[in-house]
Image (cartoon, rainbow, N blue to C red):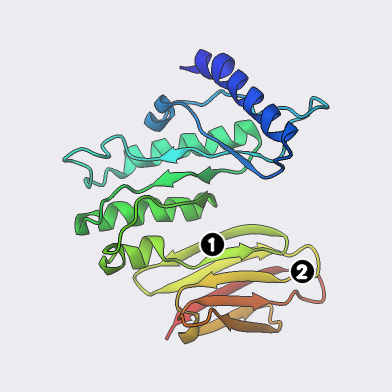
Amino acid sequence: ANNFERNQLSGFYQKARNVMRSAGFDKIIFLEHNYFGNLGMRSDFALPKDEKGQTDLRCVYSPHGYDIITDTPMAFDDNSARVDAIFEMIEQNGAHKHTPVMLGEWGAYYNSPAAYDAANHIARIIESKKFSQTYWSHDDNLYKLAYFHTAISRAFPRAVNGTLISYKNMPETKDFEMKWEECNHAKTIIYHPFVSNVNVSLFPKSHYKISRIPDSNAGYVIIDACKNKARRSIRIAQK
């Protein structure tokens, strides 16, 4: 599998990148490991190079993040150690490639109430490793399930002034916490699904405002930077 990634897959991705860039496509290209990477194996494909021989920084590692028992009758058995090992390897792959990790898929719970523990365990991994992510799959009944409100519809940092240190949602208390190190005077923006009904504790204090999305309980907490660069923390608690 690793020889395939180092040779055939890397070559394919390079050719695809060259064609896309020559056609004027300048957006981010998301690249996935081969199937065996889903089992927790190391990924060795190389990120494509630009015309100067430098890594194309608009190419991002975008693996799928699934337990090996997904799509089986045992799919909702929450084996934390196995799942932890798979996602640990995904994190190592991103570090090895010197690229952020964007989970192209995770979930596949097919709206089963039995998925609550498994879904929340992976959501907390995503937060602790600061992955970007997209959930699969969706239908009209998803919103009725408990894990939708704790693992999918979550608060998260949309834009951070400086370096994101950590963030986490706490389903038991419905609180959100985040820490970051500011580096300039830009604003920090946090999405929250129930921003219309929250208490905000910010340290060090600075001006912030709450901006609701029209016809929704969701919206953003928009935080001004401190006058001097600082390590910041925030706690957003639902009333």
Please identify the quadrant where the C terminus is shown. Answer: bottom left
Say left or right for 143 vs 235. left
Say left or right for 201 vs 225. left
Secondary structure under badge 1? strand
Q: Quick one: label 1, few (<14), some, or many (20+) residues within 10 Å? A: many
| 181 over 52 or under it: above or below | below
User: Callout 2, which amino acid?
Assistant: Ala
Residue 102 rendering spot, x and y as whole percentages: 54, 45
Do labels 1 and 2 touch, CB within 8 Å?
A: no
| 169 over 114 or under it: above or below | below
Residue for point 42% across, 55% down: 124
User: Callout 1, which amino acid?
Assistant: Tyr
Secondary structure under badge 2? loop
Identify the residue position indicated by label 2 in the image. 186
Of circles 1 and 2, the one toward us is: 2
Circle on res. 167: 1
Residue for point 74% across, 32% down: 22
Out of 183 and 113, give the one closest to the viewer: 113
Residue 77 rendering spot, x and y as whole percentages: 21, 45
Say left or right for 238 vs 96. left
Residue for point 26% across, 58% down: 116
Residue 71 rendering spot, x and y as whole percentages: 24, 39
Question: Marks 1 and 2, how far apart in space?
Answer: 19 Å
